[in-house]
Amino acid sequence: MRLVLASNNAKKLAELRALLGGLPIELLAQGELGIGEAEEPHPSFIENALAKARHAAAASGLPALADDSGLCVDALDGAPGVVSAHYAACEPAAGDREAQRRRQDAANNALLLQRLDGVADRRAAFVSVLVAVRSAADPQPLVAFGRWPGRILTQPAGQGGFGYDPLMFIPALGRSVAELDAATKNAHSHRALATAQLRSLVVEAWHLG
């Protein structure tokens, strides 16, 4: 089955391809099919994921998968939440998409550290909601949820991953997410938890596997 991922994030695509390995699915980024980004006007991860999945399915005529994920910090009342990817203002600059994403990540991390300056409660969680639809009008979307708790460091640690990974410390593993190898991250992450649920749903409801 060809399945369109409603994202152009190369690292997210690689993660999901690894997590869905073994299923008869060819995961394609929507950009490969010339599909633009969907609007994400909703206040919750699940609403935005569903909107993105339906948009990609409508534009491609194929089944689609969307991930809406982000960081929720207790002391900030759940912020940055659904605006995690664009938490800080970051002017577009010349360069490719991944270069721009790195600039945005750096700005987001700097703003988060600024807003948590002097705050003792640094508990947080990465949250991921995955939604898969067979078509844009699918009345039975598959929905999976994952939550990965940790705490926010006072300065970045590690060179791996993307987004807030250098600031998110996982006490159970004794390292930041950016210090984890890909295999460890894919075994424990919020996206891994959500994908494990989604695999079961896809096998049962779409008769794949």
Image (spheres, rainbow, N blue to C red):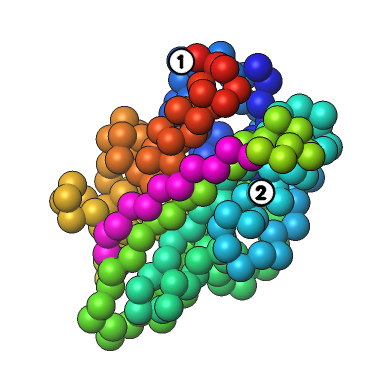
Residue assigned mark 1: 22
SS for dot 1? loop
Q: Name which residue lies at 78% across and 39% down.
A: 136
Crowd rating for badge 1 (residues with CA inside 10 Å; few <14, some 14–19, many 20+): few
Q: Nearer the viewer, residue 48 or 156?
A: 48
Q: Along the horizontal axis of the image, is 99 left or right of 33?
A: left
103 in relation to 8, above or below: below
Q: Quadrant of residue 139?
A: top right
Mark 1: which amino acid?
A: Gly
122 in relation to 158, above or below: below
Q: Nearer the viewer, residue 23 or 173?
A: 23
Can residue 122 be seen here? The reply is yes
Q: Name which residue lies at 58% across and 54% down.
A: 46
Give the total number of marks visible in the rendering. 2
SS for dot 2? helix
Magenta extent: 141-152
- Image depth: mark 1 or mark 2 in front: 2
Q: Name which residue lies at 23% across and 81% down.
A: 120
Q: Along the horizontal axis of the image, is 189 left or right of 67?
A: left
Q: CA distance from mark 1 to mark 2?
A: 25 Å
Please state the horizontal and vertical placement of residue 55, each as a whole percent of the image. Answer: 77, 44
Residue assigned mark 2: 50
Q: Along the horizontal axis of the image, is 94 left or right of 199?
A: right
Q: Earlier in the sequence, mark 1 or mark 2?
A: 1
Query: Is 144 inside the magenta-drawn segment?
Result: yes
Please state the horizontal and vertical placement of residue 149, each as a whole percent of the image. Answer: 30, 57
| Helix, strand or loop for the magenta stretch, by majority | strand
Mark 2: which amino acid?
A: Leu
Q: Nearer the viewer, residue 177 or 188?
A: 188
Query: Is 96 inside the magenta-drawn segment?
Result: no
